[in-house]
Image (cartoon, grey):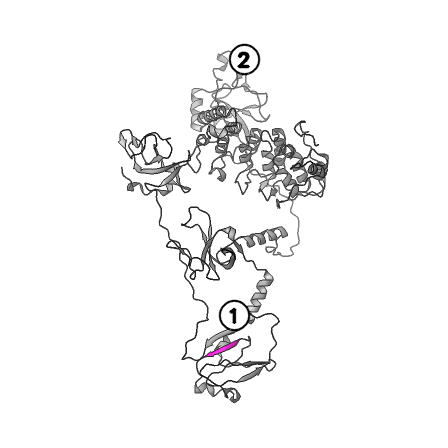
């Protein structure tokens, strides 16, 4: 049996230089594949790839193993694979991958897999930090987002509480992305993610780099309001303690006490000028929005603010900084006076106005552009390559085109009625009022009248269709009808060959070549008893002819005497006022008596499309709503102004006795409900079918005072 990988610490990663494939200059998204597994592990019924198994290791190093298969191994959330994340990424890079290559199944890049491999209990923090640093050195994009979760590497590291990786990422960006929002968390910042998952270590690092604890998400919540209840962490023994620490951290911030102690032999007079802050120093810090121990920037160097005030070595206000790297000039002591304490050559003093807080305001200096010597070239003209695409891009475009359904597309609707499907045209895509959700519905006009309506449902016109030809379905029940270019070209040529030219429609007679020979009987009006036959020769078509395209009907008037004078005598004999002729498109015309009515077979009349008009809905008394923070259902009892606070307030009667009153607040009764079921909240804290209550309010003057 394969040995357990967590029994021995993994060796330090050594990236080989003997890459068999040169690194690709641009990233790609690799198609999904199944993870390989050796015969030994398969015999033992192991459901995962084990890099510590010798046979599995040989498979991993084999050049026949593709990048997609290695990415499938990295998706396996087991210690065996996550502890070997460095070797897996190493094998991907050896095959010529770009550092920003992605797995098309999860849309995660290599660095996203690397940072989450440091999760406690599954991977190793040291290995995750090591491979993350290497990918950054190779040029991995730290701002790239996953399309499915909208999360960056910083978001993933915060979610899994890998604080050393969070520190490494923020060091390289100088804290510029510390407040980057994430759609998955209601556009909350990384601090919201840390609070929601009780990632205490990640929250401390984020605050150190200037994360804003007062930032709000789309629901108006600060990070401290996203801390979950203890009931959600029943299996975590110290959950209550972590919740208390997280609440205290987000409310009070980081500890701002001095981090050094003076030696016992140091006199008070020696530090009278060297205290952490003087009175004027505190004023300067408040004006700049800084405090001691904040992470700051001096030019392009990152450090921690340790001192701000006047000094003995120069006039003016000076800031003492402890740098992250050994790029300073002292250890906090200048001319025998200690202003702060740090390691040797890590301290530096700069004017206070040169210090800037690290965070989202930081922008790194653009890299210097190295100008290459001018080389004389021969101009062969510009070649247009805009139409050239790679095979993968073309395949992806074809897949997207075959799956994306738009208005006007031909589709097959499955199970319109039990056991029967039908074809039709998409006339409407969007949400509807007769279903309480925001999902997209497809309105289809069927080819046969087996539908349920004409495009109107519950008095709202969504699209126009014939009687019993309209139907609404979800995306699961329709399939787009795709035509290849060859089919489209064939249909176009066939349509052109079967269409009557305008000249043949206008001319009363058509001349038929002698080479065309076919016997047929003319179709004459019922009032005429004369019948005759004519012989016309033609070559039969090589492909089947649709009858709907070959038969055309139209009305003609009897020619006048002036028109009869120009006709050949042979063509005028035996023709009772009207003549039937065969046009070049080999279509048979039916001559209709003008005195008799004929059916209309021309193009179908244009049906005007009706736009969906829905009256705006508002928050009303009696509606059932959900309280966003507690997920409690309630009934609206009051909407209007209050005496205890400005603005519009909503009075709710909760289903469960988790309220604060019975509708009476500070001596004024706003509504009537059971004791302990009433509560007054702001409109933004309630939701109606997923819509925030703030968006459903009428103008403020509408509500009573």
Quadrant housing residue 51? top right
Q: At 52% across and 77% down in the image, what residue appears? A: 588
Q: Which mark is residue 548?
A: 1
- Foreground of the two, 99 or 60: 60
Q: Which residue is mark 2?
A: 263
260, above or below 459, in the image: above
Is residue 611 covered in magenta?
yes
* Magenta highlight: main SS: loop
Image position of 146 (left or right of 286):
right
Q: The residue tagged with tag 2: helix, strand or loop? A: loop
Q: Is residue 312 above or below residue 517?
A: above
Is 473 drawn above or below residue 494 in the view shown?
above
Measuring 45% from the left and 56% from the top, which residue is drawn there?
471
107 or 473, which lies in front? 473
Residue 139 visible in the displayed image: no
Q: Quadrant of the C terminus?
A: top left
Q: Nearer the viewer, mark 2 or mark 1?
A: 1
For residue 93, what is the image quadrant? top right
Which residue appears at 44% of the width and 87% of the height? Answer: 561
Task: Give the percent coordinates (x, y) of residue 686.
Answer: 38, 38
- From the image, which quarter does the N terminus lie in? top right
Residue 635, x across and y down, in percent: 35, 38
Where residue 411 appears, as percent x and y from the top left, is: 52, 57
How would you rate the neighbour count of disc 1 (Cα within 10 Å): few for under 14, some for 14-19, many for 20 or more? few
Of the numbered discs 2 and 1, the one sitting upstream in the chain is 2
Q: Is residue 622 magenta?
A: no
The residue range painted magenta reads 585-612
Q: Would residue 307 be seen by someone viewing this image from the given angle?
A: yes
């Amino acid at each position: 049996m394969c040995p357990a990988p967590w029994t021995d610490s993994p060796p330090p990663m050594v990236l080989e230089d003997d890459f068999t494939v040169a690194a690709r200059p641009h990233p790609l998204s690799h198609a999904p594949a199944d993870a390989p597994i050796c015969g030994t592990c398969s015999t033992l019924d192991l459901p995962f790839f084990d890099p510590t198994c010798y046979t599995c290791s040989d498979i991993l190093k084999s050049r026949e193993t593709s990048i997609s298969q290695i990415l499938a191994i990295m998706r396996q959330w087991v210690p065996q694979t996550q502890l070997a994340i460095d070797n897996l990424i190493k094998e991907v890079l050896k095959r010529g991958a770009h550092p920003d290559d992605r797995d098309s199944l999860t849309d995660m890049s290599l660095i996203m897999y690397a940072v989450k491999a440091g999760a406690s209990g599954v991977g190793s923090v040291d290995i995750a930090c090591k491979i993350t640093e290497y990918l950054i050195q190779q040029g991995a994009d730290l701002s790239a987002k996953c399309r499915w979760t909208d999360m960056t590497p910083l978001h993933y590291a915060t979610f899994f509480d890998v604080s050393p990786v969070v520190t490494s990422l923020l060091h390289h960006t100088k804290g510029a992305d510390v407040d980057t929002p994430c759609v998955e968390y209601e556009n909350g910042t990384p601090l919201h993610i840390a609070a929601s998952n009780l990632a205490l270590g990640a929250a401390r690092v984020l605050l150190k780099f200037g994360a804003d604890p007062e930032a709000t998400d789309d629901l108006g919540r600060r990070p401290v309001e996203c801390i979950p209840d203890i009931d959600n962490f029943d299996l975590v023994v110290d959950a209550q303690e972590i919740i208390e620490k997280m609440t205290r951290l987000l409310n009070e911030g980081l500890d701002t006490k001095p981090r050094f102690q003076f030696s016992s032999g140091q006199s008070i007079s020696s530090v009278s000028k060297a205290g952490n802050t003087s009175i004027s120093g505190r004023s300067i810090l408040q004006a700049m929005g800084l405090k001691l121990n904040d992470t700051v920037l001096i030019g392009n160097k990152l450090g921690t603010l340790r001192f701000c005030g006047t000094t003995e070595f120069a006039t003016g206000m000076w800031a003492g900084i402890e740098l992250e790297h050994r790029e300073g000039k002292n250890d906090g002591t200048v001319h025998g006076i200690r202003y702060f304490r740090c390691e040797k050559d890590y301290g530096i003093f700069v004017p206070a106005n040169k210090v800037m807080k690290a965070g989202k305001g930081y922008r790194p200096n653009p890299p210097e552009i190295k100008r290459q010597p001018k080389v004389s070239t021969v101009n062969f003209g510009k070649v247009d390559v805009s139409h050239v695409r790679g095979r993968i891009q073309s395949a992806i475009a074809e897949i997207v085109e075959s799956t994306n359904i738009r208005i006007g597309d031909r589709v097959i609707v499955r199970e319109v009625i039990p056991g029967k499907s039908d074809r039709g045209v998409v006339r409407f895509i969007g949400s509807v009022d007769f279903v309480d959700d925001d999902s997209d519905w497809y309105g289809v006009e069927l080819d046969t009248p087996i539908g349920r309506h004409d495009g109107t449902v519950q008095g709202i016109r969504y699209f126009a269709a014939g009687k019993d030809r309209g139907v609404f379905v979800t995306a699961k029940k329709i399939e787009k009808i795709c035509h290849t270019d060859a089919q489209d070209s064939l249909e176009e040529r066939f349509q052109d060959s079967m269409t009557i030219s305008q000249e043949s429609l206008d001319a009363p007679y058509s001349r038929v070549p002698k080479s065309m020979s076919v016997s047929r009987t003319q179709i004459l009006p019922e009032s005429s008893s004369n019948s005759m036959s004519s012989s016309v020769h033609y070559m039969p078509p090589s492909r089947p002819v649709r009858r709907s395209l070959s038969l055309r009907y139209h009305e003609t008037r009897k020619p006048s005497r002036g028109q009869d004078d120009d006709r050949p005598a042979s063509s005028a004999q035996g023709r009772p006022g009207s003549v039937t002729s065969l046009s070049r498109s080999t279509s048979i015309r039916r001559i209709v008596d003008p005195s008799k009515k004929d059916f209309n077979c021309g193009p179908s009349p244009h049906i005007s499309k009706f736009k969906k008009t829905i009256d705006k809905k508002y928050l009303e008394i009696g509606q059932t709503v959900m309280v966003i923070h507690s997920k409690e259902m309630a009934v609206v009892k009051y909407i209007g102004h209050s005496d205890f606070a400005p603005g519009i307030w909503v009075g709710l009667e909760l289903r469960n006795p988790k309220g604060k009153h019975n509708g009476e607040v500070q001596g004024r009764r706003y509504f009537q409900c059971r004791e302990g079921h009433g509560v007054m909240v702001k409109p933004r804290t309630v939701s109606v079918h997923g819509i925030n209550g703030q968006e459903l309010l009428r103008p403020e003057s509408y509500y009573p005072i």
